Image: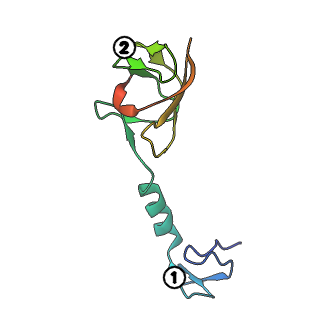
Amino acid sequence: METPLCPKCQSEHSYEDRGNLVCALCAHEWNPKEEKAVAEAAAPVFKDAYGNILQDGDTITVNKDLKIKGSSSVVKVGTKVKNIRLMDSGDGHDIACKIPGIGEINLKSEFVKKA
């Protein structure tokens, strides 16, 4: 069995001791089960304008006319978008999708409703 890298110093020299893992270089101790739970809890949660939780592959409806920068196109209210992908970008555009007639676009979750 291969032990995971130390989360503190990234050393591969770790060993198991009474259910915990210990790094031989920096002496950091951690519980791999707790580490996994913390990582899952830290994952971002994306919500639509009404507080519904969004997931990859969901279908959404645009709830506001959205002008596209650098184009004369507009995404109209009620446009249905299937198979969205969620991403954690720093600019607030957290939905990547393909809108028929417009193409690939990123949307903010505050302007959509889960269908």
The residue carrying pointer 1 sits among few (fewer than 14), some (14 to 19) or many (20 or more) residues within 10 Å by Cα, namely some
Q: Amino acid at mark 1?
A: Glu
- Which residue occupies the extreme left position in the image? 50
Q: Is residue 115 above or below residue 49?
A: above
Where is residue 21 drawn, in percent x and y? 56, 79
Instruction: Choose between 20 and 94: the one closer to the eye.
Output: 94
Instruction: Choose between 77 and 59: the one closer to the eye.
Output: 77
Where is residue 70 drawn, in percent x and y? 51, 22
* 1 or 2: tag closer to the N-terminus: 1
At x 56%, y 11%, the residue is 101
Q: Is residue 34 above or below residue 113?
A: below
Which quadrant, please, contains the C terminus? top left
- Could you tell me which secondary element the residue under label 2 belongs to? loop
- Could you tell me which secondary element the residue under label 1 belongs to? strand
At x 34%, y 19%, the residue is 64
Where is residue 43 drawn, in percent x and y? 45, 52
Q: In the image, which disc is placed on residue 54?
A: none
Q: Is residue 48 above or below residue 46?
A: above
Q: Amino acid at mark 2?
A: Val
Tag 1 residue: 29
Instruction: Choose between 28 and 74: the one closer to the eye.
Output: 74
Q: In the image, which disc is placed on residue 77?
A: 2
Where is residue 65 drawn, in percent x and y? 37, 16
